[in-house]
Image (cartoon, rainbow, N blue to C red):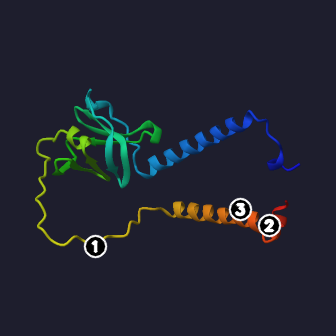
């Protein structure tokens, strides 16, 4: 009997499903955390945590996060952290080297090294402005909006995964509608 055709006990199916789902979720969140460069620890000399914001929306190194980011304010900087369900990635922004731009009342941009963080709404209000680093941005003159640019943020891996899913979906659809069309493929697979 083939390994995939072996019957499983009924109680083992949900355990296997949830176990595989949890393993896939943990692996995917770790990969996304690493790709978004959100692996910074809070340094030991950060001092005590002075404030913690509520969950809000941010763009962290190009990663969009809606209502799953919070800002912890320390004596020597800010830790921008994702929710633990989404990997718990963290970016450390020290106060002395971070350039802060406040475009509007509810929008703050923070730049430090290779990290670029945009905070919106209540997260923008939670950031206290470091002295000497505030760079006011003048209002842009009224003009026609810039042309829309193509969003190239998707990776080759995600496109490949999407194409594989489409091919598998077509295979299942053809297998259900016209099984004689996929008979050579199944013979090649040994079924």
Q: Residue at x 22, y 31 (%)?
A: 75
Tag 3 near tag 2, CB within 8 Å = no
Q: Which mark is residue 179?
A: 2
Q: Secondary structure at mark 2?
A: loop
Q: Nearer the viewer, residue 137 or 9?
A: 9
| Gap between marks 2 and 1 measured at Cα | 48 Å
Q: Horizontal and vertical percent for residue 104? A: 16, 51
Residue at point 35% right, 41% down?
69
Mark 2 Cα shell of 10 Å, populated few (<14), some (14-19), many (≥20) = some
Q: Give the left or right position of residue 144, taking residue 65 as reference.
A: left
- Tag 1, which secondary structure? loop
Q: Position of residue 78 (x, y in %)?
A: 27, 38
Question: What crowding class fits label 1: few (fewer than 14 Cα within 10 Å), some (14-19), or many (20 or more)?
Answer: few
- Residue 14, position as x, y percentages in the image: 68, 37
In the rendered structure, the answer to whether residue 144 lies left or right of residue 23 reads left
Sooner in the amino-acid sequence: mark 2 or mark 1: 1
Q: Which mark is residue 147?
A: 1
Label 3: element kind:
helix
Marker disc for residue 172 = 3
Q: CA distance from mark 1 to mark 3?
A: 41 Å
């Amino acid at each position: 009997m083939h390994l995939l055709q072996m019957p499983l006990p009924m109680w083992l199916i949900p355990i296997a499903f949830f176990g595989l789902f949890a393993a896939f979720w943990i692996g995917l969140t770790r990969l996304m955390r690493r790709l978004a460069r959100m692996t910074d620890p809070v340094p030991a000399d950060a001092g005590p945590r002075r404030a913690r914001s509520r969950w809000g929306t941010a763009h962290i190194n190009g990663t969009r996060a809606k209502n799953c980011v919070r800002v912890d304010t320390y004596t020597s900087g800010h830790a921008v952290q994702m929710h633990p369900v989404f990997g718990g990635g963290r970016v450390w922004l020290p106060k002395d080297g971070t350039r802060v731009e406040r475009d509007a009342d509810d929008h703050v941009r923070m730049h430090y090294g290779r990290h670029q963080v945009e905070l919106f709404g209540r997260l923008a209000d939670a950031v206290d402005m470091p002295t000497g680093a505030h760079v006011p941005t003048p209002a842009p003159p009224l003009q026609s909006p810039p042309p829309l640019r193509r969003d190239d943020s998707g990776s080759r891996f995600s496109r490949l995964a999407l194409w594989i899913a489409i091919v598998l979906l077509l295979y299942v659809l053809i297998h259900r509608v016209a099984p004689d069309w996929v008979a050579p493929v199944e013979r090649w697979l040994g079924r």
